[in-house]
Image (tube, rainbow, N blue to C red):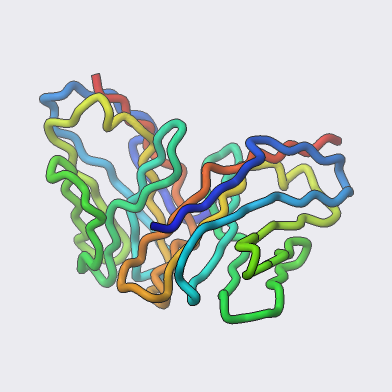
Amino acid sequence: AQTVTQSQPEMSVQEAETVTLSCTYDTSESDYYLFWYKQPPSRQMILVIRQEAYKQQNATENRFSVNFQKAAKSFSLKISDSQLGDAAMYFCAYRSRMDSSYKLIFGSGTRLLVRP
Amino acid sequence: ETGVTQTPRHLVMGMTNKKSLKCEQHLGHNAMYWYKQSAKKPLELMFVYSLEERVENNSVPSRFSPECPNSSHLFLHLHTLQPEDSALYLCASSHQTGFLPQYFGPGTRLTVL
């Protein structure tokens, strides 16, 4: 069974600085997706960024980018030029492309605090 | 606001009650989801609907009964729940492609006494 681990329950970053959130996963599959979701205090979670495992190029969405290391099964999220609005819970998630389920496997989340 | 609304935001019910959670989206999405977020546990997918048809039931007990009358509305009917069902229930929606939830609602905080 696949698992997703976020080992940092909480991280803190100074406004305008860069922070990296860690995520590791365990799978025996070769084809899958990885995602980062953001859940602000209002609890309306949104998809931030996605990565297909077959793509070597790291995904980027504005100030958000990932460092995908397939061999190491690592999928970290880098937030550049942090803003107060980035404060939220961040969830890493995995989905197989090799079965018919739409199930996302989520990590336990990392709370990001942004200091003004 | 993400465009996905849920009512009620808080619900307290006894184990013998019957209640319903409602989710609404007007984003033009045609896939909708129910997720359960428990304390100290990762988010768990419960159901997926596409074009009002259930496409996934993730081994959810029958005391949870989903209903999708149209592509904008999703319900979760609750009956004879257990205290361990207390959690935050999140609705989400997306375009059908890939069945990947894009936007979540604010959730209903459910407490079962």
Residue B27, quarter of the rendered image: bottom left
Residue B52 shown left or right of residue A18 in the figure: left
Give me the residue at 68% from left, 35% from top: A10
Give me the residue at 78% from left, 62% from top: A63
Can you give x and y, in whole percent of width and height, for residue B22 in the image? Answer: 29, 46
Residue A93 shown left or right of residue A99 in the figure: right
Which one is nearer the viewer's eye here, B12 or A16? A16
Whether residue A88 is situated above or below residue B59 in the rendered picture: above
Can you give x and y, in whole percent of width and height, for residue B47 in the image? Answer: 27, 56
Residue A29 shown left or right of residue B20 in the figure: right
Whether residue B52 is situated above or below residue A105 in the rendered picture: below
Can you give x and y, in whole percent of width and height, for residue B62 in the image? Answer: 12, 45
The N terminus of chain A sits in image quarter:
bottom left
The C terminus of chain A sits in image quarter:
top right
Can you give x and y, in whole percent of width and height, for residue A84 in the image? Answer: 77, 42
Whether residue B60 is situated above or below residue B9 in the rendered picture: below
